[in-house]
Amino acid sequence: MWEWSPLRDWVSGIITPYWTYPFLLIVQTLIVVTCLILTMAFYTLAERKVIGWIQARRGPNRIGGLLIPGLAQPFADVVKLMFKEIIIPADANGFLFRLAPFLALVPSLAIWAVIPFAPEHAFANIDAGLLYILAMTSMGVYGVILAGWAANSKYAFLGAMRSAAQIVAYEIAMGFAMVGVLMAAGSLNVGEIIRAQQGLFGWNWTWLFPMLMVYFISGVAETNRAPFDVAEGESEIVAGFHVDYSGMAFALFFIAEYVNMILISALTVIFFFGGWLSPFDGWLPADSWLAAPGFFWFGLKTLVPMFSFLWLRATFPRYRYDQIMRLGWKALIPVTLVWLLVEGFMVYFQVGPWKGHL
């Protein structure tokens, strides 16, 4: 477990050693979850501002400070949703209707337990971290399916079925892309995957660019974001699986979607862009702060795919459902299979940065 020494020393000074570990774990979990929620909140503001800029309009500009008009807009949205009534349809299954938002949100938060923000800074440094990520990312669909079924609405059920089929198709392509990363690193440990990418030209994107494209496109589809947002297509099925949700129940789905966007961005950086490694590693003296690995580089790199999510939404129209299925089954999966074969030859003949991983 990540143990930030000042925090550990402070905790050890106020409680008995027996309770230090669980208390430290709770405090660190609260810190990470709070930072995620705040990041998500400002991400929604950035989305409105960026899309407004792309479409030649101003975006939120009323609520907030003088330096950044609209800065308090995310918090105004939270207050609005907190005070709105949660309406449960008369024919809905009340228990499953309430449970579905939590099933969508909890897996997206649980994955962060194995995300290394910096060297030796992960809650759980487990050897099967990649399998854990695959398992948790696959569980989010249950919340969507339950939401569509429990509402007892045709629109909601159609959205849930669309989402389930879409996630199955793109989960396979995403899994094959992660197999390519596993072959390159020779380990299922997320930290080891980052360490295997030493040097700017050792980053996986230089050798696995097709896998990078497949992984990120699949990530956009997995999060049901534009142009793959047919599960909640407003012009077709009136918001889909969360058409009957309101108040904080809707907010939980909203939070889950944006946390998943941040997560896919972070995983893209970890698998293909060296995680917390510096791009100047090997180019500058080792004692230079620019060459030092750390959270600064991890956070800075993560902003790029986060911006790409917004750019895609502002640029592309929504795909038809048959186009989405065709792209997943007939384009992305074959690309990953072919590149896995190419990568297998590269690893076997020790071409590229993967020498010694057999």
Image (cartoon, rainbow, N blue to C red):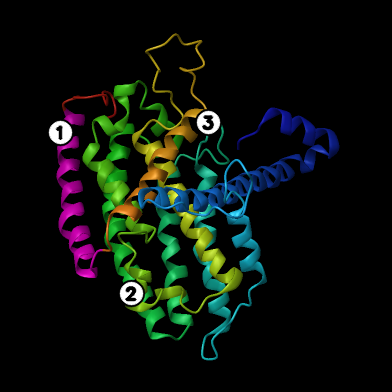
What amino acid type is highlighted by mark number 3? Phe
Location of residue 127 with respect to 334 vertically, above or below: above
The residue sitting at 26% across, 23% down in the picture is: 355
Give residue 156's quadrant in the image: bottom left
The residue sitting at 32% across, 39% down in the picture is: 182
- Please give the count of numbered marks on the rendered protein: 3
Is 215 displayed left or right of 2 in the figure?
Answer: left
What amino acid type is highlighted by mark number 1? Phe
**Circle 3 crowding by C-alpha within 10 Å: few under 14, some 14–19, many from 20:** some
In the rendered structure, which segment of residues is drawn in magenta? 319-348
Q: From the viewer's perspective, is the residue at label 3 or at label 2 nearer? A: 2
Q: Which residue is mark 1?
A: 345
The disc placed on residue 235 is 2
Instruction: Using the rendered image of the protein, determine whether residue 189 is visible from the camera's viewpoint.
Output: no
Secondary structure beneath disc 3?
helix
Q: In whole angstroms, how far apart are the C-alphas of marks 3 and 2? A: 41 Å
Question: Principal SS element in the magenta part?
Answer: helix
What amino acid type is highlighted by mark number 2? Ser
Residue closest to the far bottom = 91
Instruction: Using the rendered image of the protein, determine whether residue 247 is visible from the camera's viewpoint.
Output: yes
Give residue 282's quadrant in the image: top left
Reading the chain from its start, which is encountered first: label 1 or label 2? 2
Location of residue 324 with respect to 13 vertically, above or below: below
Q: Which residue is mark 3?
A: 295
The residue sitting at 37% across, 61% down in the picture is: 224
Secondary structure beneath disc 1?
helix
Residue 95: x and y in percent read: 58, 80
